[in-house]
Image (cartoon, helix red, strand yellow):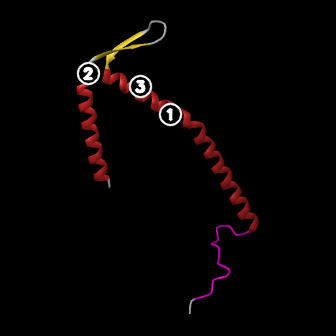
Amino acid sequence: MKFVSTIAGIILFVLFFGFALKNTQEVDLHFFLNYELRGPLVLMLLAFFIAGAALGILALTPTVFRQRRQTSQHKNTIQALQSAAGTGNAQPTPDAVNPAR
């Protein structure tokens, strides 16, 4: 599996590198208040891709922390219930299983 992912990574790198070589022309990016930014198209695309990925990670941060907090609370609840029942980490035994003859 590691070999397949390495080959896929190499193929993607070659494709993106070829894309970068074909898109080196200068582009103008116009913002508000007559602010203008000039640069190669591939660098503009890369910058906006990185900015989008960073914003996506920031958007997921509260969800990740909430899930971690809930997981911790659930673990504490399970430990409290196990200690109250006195089972500890004992494996449950089946009640209605007839032995095979």
Amino acid tagged 2:
Thr
- Earlier residue among tags 2 and 1: 2
Q: Which residue is drawn at 65% across and 45% down?
A: 69
Q: Say the numbered circle drawn on residue 81.
A: none
Q: Is residue 9 in the magenta section? A: no
What percent of the width, then of the height, locates residue 13?
Answer: 27, 37
Asked whether, in this view, residue 96 is left or right of residue 1, the answer is right
Asked where in the image residue 82 lies, by quadrant, the reply is bottom right
Name the kind of residue labelled 3 in the image.
Answer: Phe
Q: Where is residue 73 in the image (x, y as percent from the top left)?
A: 68, 50
Q: Find disc 2 in the rendering and name its residue.
A: 24
Q: Residues within 10 Å of mark 3 (few under 14, many from 20)?
A: few
| Residue sitting at x 51%, y 35% | 57
Q: Which residue is drawn at 24% across and 37% down?
A: 14
Residue 32 x/y as whole percent: 48, 10
SS at mark 3?
helix
Extreme right residue here? 84
What number is the disc on residue 48? 3
Mark 1 → mark 3, Cα distance in angstroms: 12 Å
Residue drawn at (40%, 10%) of the image: 36
The front one of 86 and 32 is 32
18 above or below 91?
above
Disc 1 target residue: 56
Measure the alpha-carbon separation of dots 2 and 1: 27 Å
Q: Locate the N terminus and report the quarter of the image it occupies.
A: bottom left
Give the magenta range.
86-99
Rendering coords of residue 52 (x, y %): 46, 29
Q: What residue type is labelled 1?
A: Gly
